[in-house]
Image: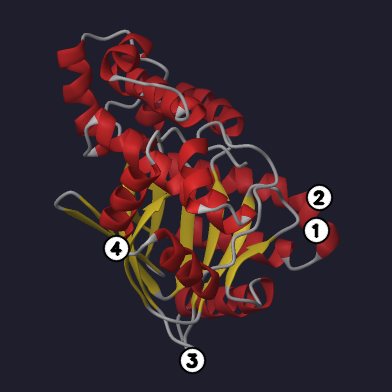
Amino acid sequence: MTQADSSAARMVRLLEQLAPVEGYNLSALDDVRFLRSNRPLTRTPVLYDPGIVILCQGRKRGYLGDDVYVYDAQHYLVVSVPVPFTMETDASQAEPMLAVYMRLDLQLASELLLQVDEALGPSDAPPKGLYASPMDDGLRDSTLRFLEAMSVPGDARILGPALVREIYYRILTGEQGGSMRAALDRQGHFAKIVRAIRKIHSSYQERLDVLSLAREASMSVTSFHLHFRNVTHSSPMQYLKSTRLHQARLLMLRHAMSASTAAFDVGYESASQFSREFKRFFGRTPHAEIEWMKATYALPEPATPSPYVSSH
């Protein structure tokens, strides 16, 4: 067995302990979850918070437009901005999907970005809202030491944050780190679109239109449409609709809201329109979708609020 194989096997054993139940398992760190899935999942719409997903066993595939993003024990996924896409999982009871999810700490990422830019120079890579990239030896080693620390309660709280920082550094300087650095930069068209995306996630209950969102981004409507689609593979109004539908699904799941109450809470004026659009988007009625979610996922409440998605 090679050293890489030995490290991979050790990470699987550690994650089996850290993620004993199916779904999202909490950790000693607010922005870290350990994921387990004991069954395959067919394509389902998802909207991830910005973050990093490192799989140690199993495979996931994300579909965005014509692009396919494969992340498995040899690849990790980075989400720089919330992008609605569809995802499917390869897993089984005998060989569950095991993964680490780190919600993006924008303050930590920005601090490291300045240091990395000073050392390497600003990135000239194109910014990306979503990408999968191969695991290198440095990131694999950092992830193993992180999982070992997280397996010991005292080590988790004291050493965990420093090891999270190390993993961020490995990704920012990795094969596609330039794209993440460019996405975190506060200048340029990508950054302007990010401002509009944050507006959508903070105010999706309000009456939003393309003109108001273009103003938020300080862009003309034509330019805003073009650059928004380049970042999200969606029009601004389609993105707003998907955000509302995802948020309504969380409200119904976490707070047992009725479909009509959730619809009005996220900004719909017609419950019947909401139900039609919900079924078209998720492939199930609101009631059927929530029953399926309860049987499939375990979703803890976020410990800290996201700058993008309301935790309710």
Q: Earlier in the sequence, mark 1 or mark 3?
A: 3
The residue tagged 3 is 94
Q: Are marks 2 and 1 in contact (CB under 8 Å)?
A: yes
Task: State whether residue 149 appears in this view.
Answer: yes
The amino acid type, in three-letter code, at marker 1 is Asp
Q: Earlier in the sequence, mark 4 or mark 2?
A: 2
Q: Nearest to the eye among marks 4 and 2: give it.
A: 4
Above or below, 252 relative to 202: below
The span from disc 2 to disc 3 (Cα, nearest Å) is: 34 Å
Q: Nearest to the eye among marks 2 and 3: give it.
A: 3
The span from disc 1 to disc 3 (Cα, nearest Å) is: 30 Å
Q: Nearest to the eye among marks 4 and 1: give it.
A: 4
In the rendering, which numbered label is found on residue 283? Answer: 4
The span from disc 3 to disc 4 (Cα, nearest Å) is: 29 Å
The residue tagged 2 is 158
Local secondary structure at mark 2: helix
The residue tagged 1 is 155
Instruction: Return the x and y of residue 21 as percentages of the image width and height.
Output: 64, 76
Local secondary structure at mark 1: helix
The number of numbered discs placed on residues in the rendered structure image is 4
Local secondary structure at mark 3: loop
Above or below, 30 relative to 295: above
Q: Residue at x 46, y 73 (%)?
A: 4
**Quadrant assignment for the C terminus:** top right
The span from disc 2 to disc 1 (Cα, nearest Å) is: 5 Å
Q: Is residue 110 left or right of residue 129?
A: right
The amino acid type, in three-letter code, at marker 3 is Ala
